[in-house]
Amino acid sequence: MKRVLFLMVLLAACCCGVVAQKTWAQHERYAAQNDSINADEIGENRKKKNRPTAVLMGNSITDGWATKHPEFFAENNFVGRGISGQVTAQMLSRFQADVVALNPKMVIIMAGTNDIAMNNGYIAHEQILQNIQSMCELAKYNKIKPVLCSVLPAAAFKWRPNLTPAEDIKRLNQMIEAYAKANKIKYIDYYSALVDEHGGLPKKYAADGVHPNLEAYQIMEAILLENL
């Protein structure tokens, strides 16, 4: 009986440990990679050789970019810090660990798709922008140049079939662009080059209408490099 009880307690502890490893903002996702970049950097004695030119902060679109075309990141000394499904509040929560601690020259932020998809519940456009603004302010305070990107077009979300996001995305992009212009922050417009007549991302660029294929990423890469 005691042996059975011991095994049950051990199993429960193991299960709790697995659950505890995944935080709301998934701070643990890039912990090992961040440690590797910062291995020789301590306080004011940071060595510049490991300093990324830019960290790309985002969701699954950024995550997929680094996965599908890692050569682009390596060639340009870029670091990808995208996590699937994340909203801007989650990105803001991990911004210190995944951006500031890496001491990049720039942070390139593409965020807002999952907020509009209500992945974490309803959020007003103004509050989405506030989260993006907070990331920019954190970057500036730490002498990192913020760069803001448009949200990619989407006419529908397969995981939220009741939503029609095209106009919401268009409005959010207008707000992000206006904020960037007012605060002298570089704005990268992927949206105009990729949007179709329905306000969506064409199937030739994304099979599911949301996540770009390599051809779309290469269009985005040209736009990004031309405007940095």
Image (cartoon, rainbow, N blue to C red):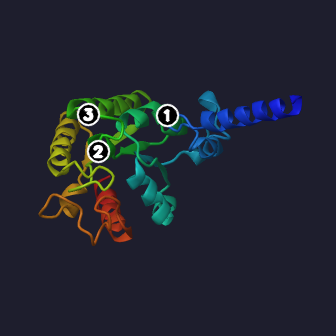
Residue linked to disc 3: 129
| Residue drawn at (76%, 30%) of the image | 9
Judging from the image, what secondary structure is the residue with disc 2 in? loop
Callout 2 touching callout 1 (CB < 8 Å)? no
Residue 40 vertical placement versus 194 (above, below): above
Snapshot quadrant of residue 93: top left
Q: Is residue 168 left or right of residue 82?
A: left
Sequence-earlier tag: 2 or 3 = 2
Instruction: Kindly tell me whether residue 69 is visible in this rendering.
Output: no
Task: Write down the quadrant of residue 114 in the picture.
Answer: top left
Amino acid type indicated by mark 2: Ala
Which numbered disc flags the more N-terminal residue, 2 or 1? 1
Residue 117 tag number? 2
- At x 44% / y 30%, what residue is drawn? 142
Q: Looking at the image, is mark 1 or mark 3 nearer the viewer?
A: 1
Please tell me which residue lies in front, 189 or 205.
205
Rendered residue at 65%/45% (across/down): 36
What's the distance in space between the residues labelled 2 and 3, CA to CA?
15 Å
Q: Is residue 184 visible?
A: yes
- In terms of secondary structure, where does tag 3 sit? helix
Type of amino acid under label 1: Trp
Q: Position of residue 176 (x, y in %)?
A: 22, 40
Horizontal and vertical percent position of residue 209: 28, 62
Mark 1 = which residue?
Answer: 24
